[in-house]
Amino acid sequence: MDVGTIRWGICSVGKICQDFTGNLLSLPKNEHIVEAVASSSLERAQAFAKERGISKSYGSYQELADDPNIDVVYIGSINVQHYDQVKMMLGGGKSVLCEKPLCMSPKEVKTLFSLAKEKNLFLMEAVWSRCSPAYAAVQKAIDDGEIGEARVVQAMFGEMIAVDPHHRASRKELGGGALFDIGMYTVQLAQFVFKERPYEQHAVGFLNDEGVDITSNLALKYTKQRMASLTTSSVSTFPNDAHICGTKGYIRIHPPFWSPPAITVNGEMRNFPFPKVVYKMNFANSEGLTYEANEVRRCLLNKKIESPLITHAMSIELAEIIGKLRQDLGYKLPQDDE
């Protein structure tokens, strides 16, 4: 095996795992190999593996953690399972890329990062937007002063994902909620631009009958009279673009702003074509997951335990901001008191 080959395990077989695996299988085999997939159902794991030509399938997550031929595990299970599964994989000596939200509470997030550091293993929350070439171009445009000083971030993310009361995004026991599932993308954009913790934040919105947030408006205030105005809904359809407004102009991040095909800077469009992938994607512009996979490989080959694009500190800060916003809306979880 090539010294630069990263051997992946896939934890769960849902839609986002299908998309991420499809990206890995479209990359050069001397860079990325999918060694195994695990599910709580052996039958589902076997079907997933057979369809994608993966050699090993497991009917338990512990078997994946124990596999000595895996370097890093991608976790794409439901939100409430992340904490235990990350802990299990780190315990098995595996580096981890875990879907957002990394955990249900800031305390859980901090515990996992402490464990990763103790074991000298890579751990990254899968905020894939940060790995996008379009985001790098946004940062460069800001750094080059093309819009002057960035003062306001506006972002909207709305999709009809929680209309069904039985959907995981509607249910508290599954860690549902618009903020966890999609609203975090709006918050991370504000953090990406302003690079500091807001000194004041407010949230207004609505909860469903289970007490899970479905629609909210968020206002975050930063130093130097800067602010973010963010809107999220799991029961409405939004245009899903974003704007960064400055003293000399503005940047529009084209939809979907979390994996954009283009940005417009002061009227000039800049395009970022996605890599070609072999498999059909479930989610918009999931071809952008390729950039995230390559960032993990880069970090592992350079023996890093965190990515500079989404550091441990950034994930902790994001968890703390979203945790407070969620509680402001009245959405409480048992993990808040642990």
Image (cartoon, rainbow, N blue to C red):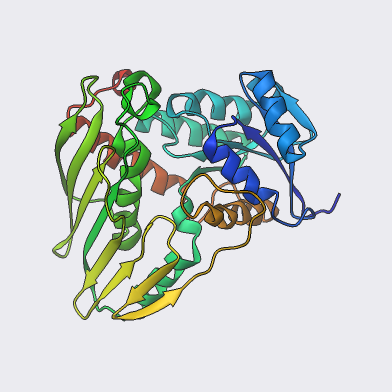
Coordinates of residue 63 in the picture (x, y in percent): 71, 22
Determine if residue 36 is in view.
no
Q: Is residue 254 left or right of residue 286?
A: left
Give the camera-side residue of 248 and 26: 26
Q: Is residue 323 above or below residue 220?
A: above
Q: Is residue 37 left or right of residue 178?
A: right
Q: Is residue 218 above or below residue 243?
A: above
Residue at 62% across, 56% down: 294
Q: Is residue 159 left or right of residue 305?
A: left
Coordinates of residue 246 in the picture (x, y in percent): 22, 73
Give the total of numbered labels.
Answer: 0
Coordinates of residue 118 in the picture (x, y in percent): 58, 34
Coordinates of residue 165 in the picture (x, y in percent): 31, 23
Give the camera-side residue of 113 and 212: 212
> Which image quarter is the C terminus in?
top left
Residue at 36% across, 33% down: 106
Residue at 26% across, 53% down: 156
Determine if residue 57 is in view.
yes
Residue 163, located in which quarter of the rendered image? Answer: top left
Q: Is residue 85 above or below residue 34?
A: above
Give the camera-side residue of 255 and 332: 255
